[in-house]
Image: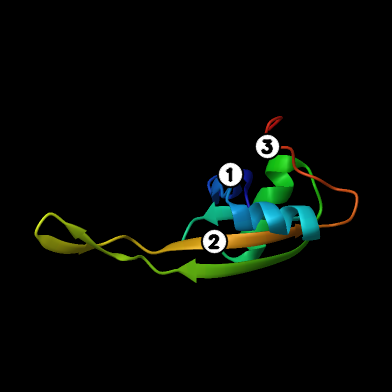
Amino acid sequence: MNQFHLAGVLEAPLISEKSTFVGEKCNTFVFKVKKSASKKDVKGAVELMFKVEVESVQVLNVKGKQKKFGRSMGRRSDWKKAYVKLKPGHDIEFSAA
């Protein structure tokens, strides 16, 4: 994988109550990633961007919700989420990155 492709895989870190709990307990971080990203892409992107070693990656597709916009019904777009578990001794500091 080239570095240009890997740099665009990660869209944003997801900061929520659940992701914070998982991060503290299991050394796992949650990212919003491109819909076309594979586990291999996510692993390479995290290792490239944050200079850490990744132990495992789990990805899941999040279905968009049905929402009402005025009188008409609409739908939010689907997106992909990745749980990235780091090897012991490695950590990501979002304030420094």
| Residue that badge 2 annotates | 81
Answer yes or no: is residue 79 visible: yes
Q: Earlier in the sequence, mark 2 or mark 1?
A: 1
Q: Position of residue 79 (x, y in %)?
A: 43, 61
| Residue that badge 1 annotates | 7
Residues under numbered marks 2 and 1 in contact, where contact means CB atoms less than 8 Å apart: no
- For the C terminus, the quadrant is top right
Q: Earlier in the sequence, mark 2 or mark 3?
A: 2
Q: Quick check: 53 above or below 37?
A: above
Q: Could you tell me how far apart the alpha carbons at marks 2 and 3 are, in whole angstroms? A: 18 Å
Q: Earlier in the sequence, mark 1 or mark 3?
A: 1
Look at label 3 and name its amino acid.
Phe
Question: Of helix, strand and loop, which one carries label 1?
Answer: helix
| Displayed quadrant of residue 29 | bottom right
Q: Could you tell me how far apart the alpha carbons at marks 1 and 3 are, in whole angstroms? A: 16 Å
Q: Quick check: 4 above or below 20?
A: above
Q: Position of residue 68 (x, y in %)?
A: 19, 60
Look at label 2 and name its amino acid.
Lys
- For the N terminus, the quadrant is bottom right
| Residue that badge 3 annotates | 94
Q: Could you tell me how far apart the alpha carbons at marks 2 and 1 are, in whole angstroms? A: 16 Å
Residue appearing at x 81%, y 52% in the figure: 53
Look at label 1 and name its amino acid.
Ala
Residues under numbered marks 1 and 3 in contact, where contact means CB atoms less than 8 Å apart: no
Q: Residue furthest top?
A: 96
Question: Of helix, strand and loop, which one carries label 3?
Answer: loop
Residue appearing at x 89%, y 55% in the figure: 88
